[in-house]
Each structure stands twice: as C-alpha cells, then as structure tokens.
Amino acid sequence: VCETEAMQERELCSAESISSSGCSQHLKIHEDVKDYYGKRLQGTDDLVLNVCVTPGKKLAKYVQDALKDVHEEVSSRYYGCGLVIPECLEGCRVLDLGSGSGRDCYMLSKLVGEKGHVTGVDMTDEQIQVAKKFVDYHTQRFGFSKSNVDFLQGYIEKLGDIGLKDNSFDLVISNCVVNLSPNKTAVLKEAYRVLKDGGEMYFSDIYADCELPDAVRTHKILWGECLGGALWWKEFVDIAKKVGFSEPRLVAASKVPVENEELQQIVGDCKFVSATYRLFKVAAGVPRERSRVIYNGWIEGCREKLEFDINYTFTEGETVVVDEETAVILVSSRFADEFTIQSLGKVSPSSGECPPREPQSAATDPFWLSEHVAEGGTSSCSAACSVQSKGCC
C-alpha cells in the first residue's frame, strides 16, 4: 500500500470515528477489493460466481441502443448486478459510485446529452485507466462537440476529498459496489450530501436475508464476488432512512444462486438477491399530501407507461391516486414536469374519493419479489400490483 493511500484511509477512519483496529480492517478490505478488480479480474470470464453479471430487468430499446455504442473493451470489464439507467435523464448531472471501467457512465453520457454531465468515481487505478482511455472515442461516437463525462479516483465513502460539493448532482447511481465498501453508512451519507433536494440515488446491489456470519464476511473471494459484504436488506432500509432518504422504493429483484460447491459450504443457509432500489432526497418542509396524478407520457422510452417501482406503474393519460410519500417525491423531483398533480389533502371517508392502497411490507422486500420471479412472475415494477394503474380502485 502506498503511503498516500494509507494516509487517505487513516483520514477516512478518523472522520468516521473508527477505531485503529477497525481502520486496519477497512484498509485491508479496500486493498483486497482493489487487488481483486484491478489485478485478478481481467474480464467477466474470471469471475468465480455469476453475481456480477446478473441482469436486473429487461433493457428498453433506447438503453440497448446506448449500450451498443459503448466500446467493447469497456463492456468486457463490466461487473454490475443490475440495471442502473433510470428514466427522465436529459440534462441531468449524474454521479456513478464505483464506476469501474465506465460502462454505465458512457451509457448515461449519451442519455443525458451534451447539456448533462456524468462523473465516475472509482478507487481502482486499473479500472480508472480503462475508463479514461475511451473518453474521446465516446465523445465522437455520440456526436458531441465536447466530452460530458469525467472520471475521478477516490473513495466513495469520502467524496469531499476529490472535490465533490454538497447539493451538486441530480442523480447518483451505483452498480453492485456499495456491498464492497466496509462502511455502507458513510457511502449513503455521502450520496445524500452531494444530491440536490429532490435528487435520487438509483442503484443495484446484493442483499442478504440475514446478518451474515463472520465466516462469510471475512472470506476474501466472497467479498470480492459481492456476497461477503452484502447487507441484510432490513438493515439497509433502516440505514437509508436514518441518513435522511425517503422510504426505499424497490424496482427489481432476482435470486443470486451460489453454484460453487466450496463457497456453498461457507455460505450455508444464507440467501442472496440482486435488487434495484430508488432513494429520494426530499427537502424538509415540502407538504406531504395524497394526490391525484396523471402521467403526461413525455419521457423518452416510456411514452406509454412509466414503471416507477413495484407499487406504481403509471399509464399515459390515466388518473392514479397516490399516497403522501409518492406524491411528495413526484412534486419535488425531476419527475414534477412529467405529471399533472392535484393535491387531495386529507380526504374524509364520506367524500367519495377512493384512498390509495398503502404500500405493503412486500414493497421493500427483495426476497418477496425474487420469489414472485421464481414462480414465473416478472422481476420488476408490475409484480406487486398493490396499486392499479387505472383510477384508484
């Protein structure tokens, strides 16, 4: 470990009030991850498990087209576990936490357009070098007059050290990287800090159905393959809300099998899923009122319907009554101009209005959704059907 990186790690531990023994453990995890993704893995064929190539949900055509434009060498070193390309991206400022070789950054670079900007952050030198190598290639490929993407080397737990300011991004994404961090709370705090009010963290990651035993959490290969550092999904929900985000909204989930016999013995009865969530930073003081909303159908690639999460799929021109949390997200986020929104305030039982169905516990449980998928359902938004898209009843 070079002295500069060791110093950065010590400063990070100090900022998070981590003990010297804990700091040493964090340093080791970071170095193990750098070695795994910088030296051991040269492509997806080098992975022991298929965790890092697990698809999230079916790609929309406009996303497929963007993916085709990404250079082959960049795509060959992609290790994500889901799809982190949300809707309504034009003109957005986007931050990718753990950007790796830059595949998702370059896809987003095309989708945000020349007026938008994408920043990728990664701590692994080899991955950053691959990403930077193709900046000019993609600028020309997309027909842009100048690049709208840059890559910074640093730790996602301390974005201020690389100059990322408060309230500076519309969207933060991450693709199977948060689990690799030894301090997930710090990652979510930093994401919240750099997001503008109304901003969103849209990310895919691996989650466990329990608190993982030490034998799993300390296994170098399981950590590198994104399982050893997986959070119990309920712990993730608690952390996200404590940091300040709105209730996590589940978008997609699928089971992650452990097919290597040796690793199966270590994992035991622990189960894993790949899940995509969206978290919103809602400003304090914004009124939270149940509302009647109509999707205008203007979003690229989602003209007929917008699959927002497993609770809500909005069809163009149809009225949906939404709960307070969903209403405040739509009003305060980049989706505000995509809907006609009418507040209903507090509606009495005798008013004739049918109240929205309250989000069920299943709406945040990725294992519930992955079981639905295993039974032949879909992996994403329309699965829960807890709110109908037409009318409110």
Image (tube, helix red, strand yellow):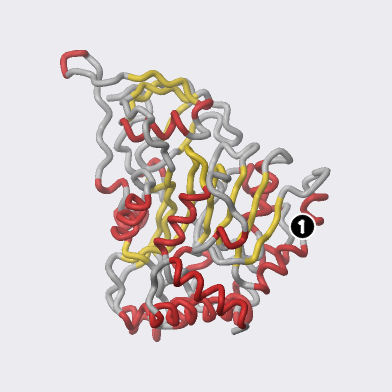
Foreground residue among 139 and 371: 139
Q: Secondary structure at mark 1?
A: helix
Image height check: is 284 above or below 362?
above
Q: Nearer the viewer, residue 237 or 316?
A: 237
Q: Residue reaching furthest top?
A: 351
With 201 as the anchor, is 5 left or right in this view? Answer: right
Which quadrant holds the N terminus? bottom right
Query: To which quarter of the image does residue 222 belong?
Result: bottom left
- The answer to which of 105 and 54 lies nearer the viewer is 105
Q: Quadrant of residue 332?
A: top left
Q: Is residue 275 above or below residue 321?
A: below
Residue 256 locus on image (x, y percent):
41, 66
Q: Is residue 119 above or below residue 98?
A: above
Q: Quadrant of the C terminus?
A: top left
Q: Is residue 368 above or below residue 11?
A: above
Q: Is residue 306 left or right of residue 230?
A: right
Q: Residue at x 71, y 38 (%)?
A: 115
Q: Neighbour class for label 1 at 10 Å: few (<14), some, many (≥20)?
A: some
Spot the residue most to the left: 350
Q: At 40% across and 58% down in the image, what residue appears?
A: 254
- Residue 322: image x %, image y %? 34, 29
Q: What amino acid is found at the position of numbered circle 1 in the picture?
A: Val
Query: Which residue is the site of mark 1?
Result: 135
User: In the image, what residue occupies the spot 58% across and 44% down?
Assistant: 60
* Residue 239 position in % (x across, y down): 34, 56
Count the labels in the image: 1
Where residue 69 sits in the image (x, y, percent)?
73, 52
Q: Residue at x 54, y 62 (%)?
A: 80
